[in-house]
Image: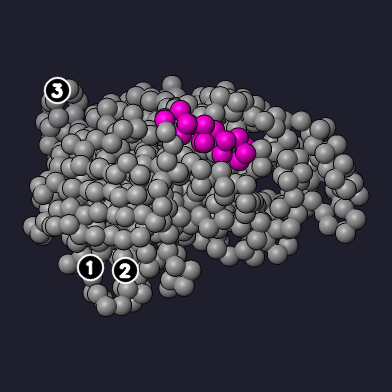
Amino acid sequence: MRGLRHRTKMIVMASALGLTAATLAGCGTSQATPSAKVSTNKPVPGGTIIQALGPLVAINWYQPLRPVAYNSLYDAWSASLMYKGLFHVASNGTIDLSRSIASSITWNKAGTVYTVKMNPKWKWSNGTPVTAQDVQFTWNLIKAASSPNAPAPWPYAGAGSGGVPQLIKSFTVLGSHAFQITLTSPVNQQWFEYNGLGDFMPLPEKAWNLYPNNVNQELKYLAANGNNVNFFKVVDGPFRLTKAVQNVSWTFTPNSHYDGHKPYINKFVLAYQTSETSEVNGLKTGTVQVGYLPLSMYSTRKQLINDTLNTSYSYSIDRTILNFKSPQVGSILRSLPVRQAMQMGIDQPAIIQALYNGMGVSGTGPVPLHPSTFLAPQLSQPLYPYNPTQGIKLLEKNGWHLVGGVMTNSKGQKLSFNMQYDSGSSTTLAMVQIMQQNWAKEGIHVSLSPLPFASMLQYHHQPTKWQIQTGLGWSYGGSYPSGGGMYATTGGYNFYGYSNSTMNTLIAATHTPQPTTAASQQALDAYQMFAAKHLPNLWMPVPKGLGEVAKTVHGVRSSANHFTDSISPQYWWVGQ
């Protein structure tokens, strides 16, 4: 479930925003209540659970395959409730085949041929089996949607991640419940299993393939129905989307034909709200059962007497994204000394202390610090700690000098940028103001532009619309953190134009077969050390998530998966 994550930190089962009582009435739901007095340690059927989304966050795309403009974690959530991935990644990072459509995944010694067998128990909600032909349908869509000439709003956001589609030589159906993928060259088997095969979510070919002889027309058809609730009638996941009111709520009800763990609850609602304050009010009044506590409002914790607090880090990083394609400032941002000075101007410890109540860690590179499974030991601390004085010296050494308080070079170019940030979070507002003030100490002038989360995503393929964006995080969603999709020149999520031949080579090395696990880690260490130094984006502090769950709601914590940032409300229930 790779995707952009709203910066407001949360544990996976406790996202950001909820409903006030007035809004709740508008979407026709009620707070979670048991049908009778029951024991809290035994699941019982019935009830509604409302989970809050991030401030000003809307779900805009329900299709499992997502273009860049709709590649948010929250869009991924809605799809994952309705459609199962090929395999389930557990919270410890291992693949759990007992909960997967795939019953086995094997490969040859060279790492060029991958054979997948599928459990025949899985069926679509209309009773037809989930087959290898459904996976082939997905592959054909991915291949076409990854093309630069794919119809809007494509291309596919996952293009380049896991070597898909460029490394795939052939896809062969071996039977109704088995298929084989052959690659053009040997690769790191663990990397391809997680990042390549992870893209092959079965889609209902018989229900959706309206244009079998014209894949571009099929892509247009699917895109036209990307947020059409009535389109998603054939599902294989635990829920189906039954109602969507834009900027209000998205309501899911159980798929009675689901072949996995059937939901206990009658209704699950993902809810929108306009501010952090209203979400906290929803927690206080009980109109939100699964929510979050903004770190900036930590002092209100004692008022949430009916909730349980859960804290955690998700497997993600936070970053400030630079637009190397910008016609106004792209050439300036492509200068490494400028990026180094900008990184030295970000006071991560101050942000953590002032805004996160000390509950956070500094961003050091492209691999998360928690858990530290894949982290290079040298990156436990930032390579560019806060040091505006050193930043000024570096800029002056590279031809920049203060003119009217702004660093200017001999060409008359100025270090003056516009930075867009997520407008829904008061914490993010305070953060960008700190960044603005500290950059000014180095002679870097930054104006601030608040935007809704969805608007920031929409601008990504429009180079003239933005220069710098912050308030966004990246969730690895259970994938191997080699960064090809983000930082390789041809990466599907490299919409900002970063390109470096050394980076490409180092990323490629993490994808090639290695004789030992230690050798694989060495290749990953080399990549992440270069990325940490070369700054394809600016590294930002990562706050701990504070999740709030009503005491009447159970199963949230035990089913949480911080490694994938997914949610599993089919395991939640309402009790006393």
C-alpha distance separating marks 3 and 2 = 45 Å
Q: Residue at x 42, y 41 (%)?
A: 513
Magenta stretch contains residue 518: yes
The amino acid type found where label 3 is placed reads Ser
The answer to whether residue 514 is left or right of residue 32 is: right
Q: Which x, y percent locates residue 46?
A: 14, 39
How many residues crowd mark 3 within 10 Å: few (<14), some (14–19), many (20+)? few
Q: Looking at the image, is mark 1 or mark 2 earlier in the sequence?
A: 1
What is the secondary structure assignment of the residue under circle 2? helix
Q: Quadrant of the C terminus?
A: top left
As shown in the figure, which amino acid type bears the numbered disc 2? Leu
Report the residue at 25% width, 64% height from top. 137
| Foreground residue among 457 and 434 | 457
Around disc 1, counting alpha carbons within 10 Å, would you say few (fewer than 14), some (14 to 19), or many (20 or more)?
some
Q: Is 256 situated left or right of 146 in this image?
A: left
**57 up-or-down from 96: above or below:** below
Q: Position of residue 475 (x, y in %)?
A: 45, 42
Q: Name the foreground residue: 561 vs 187.
A: 187
Question: Of the numbered discs in the image, which one, if any, rests on residue 222?
Answer: 2
Q: In the rendered structure, which segment of residues is drawn in magenta?
A: 516-532
Find residue 179 and report its horizontal and vertical position in percent.
21, 54
| Marks 3 and 1 close (CB-CB < 8 Å) | no
Task: Identify residue for label 1.
Answer: 208
The disc placed on residue 200 is none
What is the spatial separation of the Cα atoms under label 3 and label 1, in whole angstroms? 44 Å
Query: What is the magenta segment's predominant secondary structure?
Result: helix
Amino acid carrying mark 1 in the image: Trp
Question: Residue at coordinates 35% horizontally, 60% vertically from top-left?
Answer: 169
In the rendered structure, which disc, 3 or 2, sits on the residue that comes first in sequence?
Answer: 3
**CB under 8 Å between discs 1 and 2:** yes
Q: Nearer the viewer, mark 3 or mark 2?
A: 2
**Mark 3, residue position:** 39
